[in-house]
Image: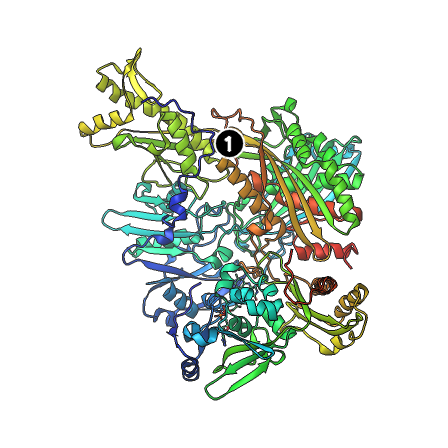
Amino acid sequence: MKPPSFDYRRPTSVPEALAYLEDLEDAKILAGGQSLIPMMNMRLARPHTLIDINGIAELKAIREENDHIIVGALVRHYQLQFNRVLQRQVPMIGQAERLIGHEAIRTRGTIGGSLSHADPQAELPVLATLLDWDMVVQSRQETRSISAREFFLSYFVTALAPNELVTAIVMPRQKARGHIAEYAIRSGDFALAIAAVTLSTTPTGLVESFSVALGGIGDVPWRNPEWECQWINEASTNDLFRDIAESITHEIEPTDDFNASADYRRKLVSHLVLEALKEIGLAQSTDDGTLTQRRLP
Amino acid sequence: MPNTSTPFTGRPIPRMEDPHLIQGQGTYVSDIHFDHQWVMALVRSSHAHALIKDIRCGTAAKIPGVHAIVTASEYPDLKRRLPGMEPMAPPILAYDRVHYVGQPIVAILADSRYIAEDAADLVEIDYEPLPAITNAEIAARDENLLHPEFGTNVLEHFEKQSGDGVQALRTAHHVVNATLRMGRVSAQPMEPRALAAQYDPSSGELLVYHATQSVHRAQERIANLWGMDPEKVRVVAPEVGGGFGVKNGSYPEEALVTYLAKTLAQPVKWSGDRFEEFFGTYQEREQVHHVTLGFSQEGMIVALHDTYYQDNGAFAGGGMLVSQNTARNIPGPYRIPNLYIEGYTVMTNKVPQAPYRGAGRPQGHYIIERMLDRAADQLGWDRLELKMKNLVAPKDFPYATGIEGVTLDSGNYPRVFQDLLEELDIDAFRMRQSEARQQGIRLGLGVSNSVEISAGFGFEGVRFQLNPSGQILLTTGATNQGQGHRTALAQLAADALSIPMEQVTVIEGDTGRIARSIGTFGSRTIIMAGNAVRVAAQGFIDKTRAIAADLLEAHVDDVVFDNGQFFVKGVPSVSHDWKALADAWQSQSHPEWPTHEDYFSSSSATYGFGSHGVIIAVNPSTAAVRIERYVILHDSGRVVNPLLANGQVIGGAVQGLGSALYEEMLFGPDGEPLTTSFLDYRLPGANEMPDIEVYHRDYPAPSNPEGYKGVGEAGIIPSQAIMLSAVEDAFRDVGLRLDYAPITPGRLFKSLQERGENA
Ligand SMILES: Cc1cc2nc3c(=O)[nH]c(=O)nc-3n(C[C@H](O)[C@H](O)[C@H](O)COP(=O)(O)OP(=O)(O)OC[C@H]3O[C@@H](n4cnc5c(N)ncnc54)[C@H](O)[C@@H]3O)c2cc1C
């Protein structure tokens, strides 16, 4: 469990990092190291050079711009959890963070690392898919923006080219109430299934907007806007929630492995979607007009 | 100054070793660095069963910093069979055939583990795969042989019978059958196995630092294997970070490190990593039992019949003992007048089995406890009443269980069990359970009784030495892997010599410091070394009385020792303490300090007892089990230090709950292990565990002078039985039956699905 030898660079600016990415053979970005270093120790990843971006100050900021929040790629899990702007504008993040690993991991791991690593059991890719985040991606040649639904391609595979760096994540303000629910065998484990849901209703109690993203059940976060559409304008009641939770089980083909059968994951998804919807319903019934997260029990 | 304070023994004294360990000042094998040492990494088999066609090391040998690439064909000594693995031992390095994924084939010595692993990556091995045998019952049919030269896959078949044996089942009024299984588990001590050895060619001495539970057994193995005088092999266990039985056996790495250090006259070190803990360290538990239990009309057990198969992995070794010990434990604390038990210990293409904490005790109790639950459920009896009425009662002592050498001798099982039921308040629980069930919340209760059979063989010794300023050095060969012996033995020694504990230094696990020992395992150290302290202290005092006699200018027969003081009988006003003796000795410039070494032997086992109760909540939607409350009533015999004893009992319970709820080594159809990191092999964490409540009901053991009983394995015995019992109870109304431990969420989901319970 020792990594093969590697070279190490520590740029202090984005252009410097991009130059290394461009010029060095088989280089990999090192952010929090919480996924990359274990993979290297197990010799599943064998980069020739590590480009440590922890010295790049401009990747560490959280800014509000119009209707968006722009989060630097190096912002760490614990900052996502406790940042005031995010707590107000994207309260689902703080809720999700509590489910990610343990404090030691959250102190090091970053948003850019989590999204680039693209673990199908990770929480942030699910939120990115649910809340339509855009990844700002730079290479020496260009800066482009990739939407979450185009970013995740397969297990641990993203649309990033080898010479590209995620510099920031652009998040729309969360307009609807949301809830993320998951089931992990032990606290802090990667989840067997994750369900993230947003829902808003009209003053007369009809569904106005509704979205679901799932994690842990396939190679990339699952979402199906067409399926979501059919529930618009329905009366938002517990009966509807149950129908949704039942309907989604027919939409998915979950992974089947020794940790959980496909049937088990399907059942978990249904339960988690229902739990999330009920939580949102409950929050709406006691609505105080803000989206600030409710404390989990 | 006379020491008249209360004795140290029996008090919850915090561990003396903790400040040192918690500040990272402990020295483990991986902290030992010999000058110019070569570090070993191994190339292990990637096949469960295959012929080795070719091994190519050429490119690996060219990496700078690589010193040697070792195969059995180049070093034929390494074709020798590992000692202590009879009757079917593996070669030290596999050369023509491999029998499990993880079996060592090539050893690489390099300047660092990094370089050694780089070289290991470049070794190319051609295999010709053979069909893997991964099921013990199928293997026992001998259709495919693991070791054709051995002639059968069955290492051992044994029978144990008492009373009328299986014939008695005919007289039973009710008969209940079940097939019960336990999955494979891995101990996973925090510190992986490790060794470092240095050979001095001029003196012919081999120094071995070894993360082992038994330095003297290791010394004997190493000396025998390499034809050395045991006096020339010194084995030292420095700090050892957990053992749980798996650091007690004979392993290829021990043979390799010692051989290479000696043959190459070069210090060699191997610190296993977590992968090696999964691939190369022996595992345990995996068994399947076909059981029949017969009852009288009134619900008294008439007879038990059990035929079981233990999946022992690819070779013999300590697993055979586990299989035997399972049989010894099947009756537990219950009266079973007629027994017929037969066990098959069978080889398969997996890592070998070796004793892991419990070592047959959990397996045996799992059978009787689960069968009593099953019988109660099928025959419409109350589970708790059925257990109560079949418990051995105090008036039955000494009670011969029908298994040779197992005679229950002390305690009051029904009373302790009754106390548990009161502590749990069964009636209140049943009400809460049915109310919760109305709201879709599933609560379950499990109870389990167990006897912990400990020690009962061999000896253990200690050596006292008077040191400058009256300090007392106590050495023992029994090593410490985290149990806190240094504190417990210091308590005993301080009381025996009437000195403060700080005046005692305990050193364990060094063959250079004491002649003989057996080691720390099977909950034996306090029973054996604890009694030895008392024996040796008397001899030590007798010797040192001679020094006092000199000082007092009296005849030694007139000198008495009382309360830390030596004086002439009847003249306590003129007395000398240990410091005065030490000063006198020093002033006389003797070449050596006074010592006394003595041993305690016993072939009588001790029988601790425990009643455990658990209350759980199951979420039927996720199949998640949450432990609400876990209560233990425990008979530890005479307790030296309640903090340490409770630590053992609680630690055992937590470790057992891991193997009841989460932990299982899974293998693919080709025998490849699937759970090879903590990502998939889930140990219980603090978040998952309740605050375990321990209440003592201590009855001194009649079989040893100090009345000690074992505590090290007590906690882990009932875990699998009790958890399956509780989960079934949560779904009693739908008749849930569980026959496989652990009950992981995935497995519980499936069982509920089969009952139509979670659609
Ligand atoms: C015990 C444990 C438990 C965990 N549990 C969870 C959990 O429950 N849920 C969860 O979501 N995660 C979990 N994690 C993973 C953790 O969240 C990591 O922080 C995260 O996956 C990766 O972030 P990082 O900053 O550490 O990335 P690194 O490990 O540094 O990098 C990961 C990958 O992303 C690439 N990368 C990093 N930053 C960028 C960038 N800006 N641009 C392009 N590529 C980049 C790297 O090259 C590498 O390939 C756990 C980790 C551990 C060790």
Q: Is residue B356 above or below residue B100?
A: above
| Crowd tier of the residue under label 1, counting other residues whose Cα lies within 10 Å: few below 14, some 14–19, many 20 or above | many
Q: Quadrant of residue A13?
A: bottom left
User: Residue B759, percent across and down?
Assistant: 78, 60
User: Residue A145, percent across and down?
Assistant: 56, 83
Q: Nearer the viewer, residue B175 or B115?
A: B115
B267 sits to left or right of B459: left
Chain letter for mark 1, please: B
Q: Nearer the viewer, residue A218 or B2?
A: B2
Q: Regarding mark 1 in the picture, which secondary structure is present there?
A: loop
Residue identified by numbered label 1: B456
A52 sits to left or right of B467: right
User: Residue B637, percent across and down?
Assistant: 53, 29
Most extreme residue toward the bottom, as rendered?
A141
| Residue B188 appears in the rendering | yes
**Tag count:** 1
* Colour convention: rainbow
Q: Which amino acid type corresponds to the residue marked 1 in the rendered image?
A: Gly
Q: Which quadrant, please, contains the N terminus of chain B? A: top left
Q: Nearer the viewer, residue B387 or A207?
A: A207
User: Residue B292, percent across and down?
Assistant: 72, 40
The response on whether ligand 1 sits within 8 Å of label 1 is no
Most extreme residue toward the front, as rendered?
A288
| Residue B185 appears in the rendering | no
B589 sits to left or right of B285: left
Q: Is residue B215 above or below residue B754?
A: above
Q: Quadrant of residue B609?
A: top right
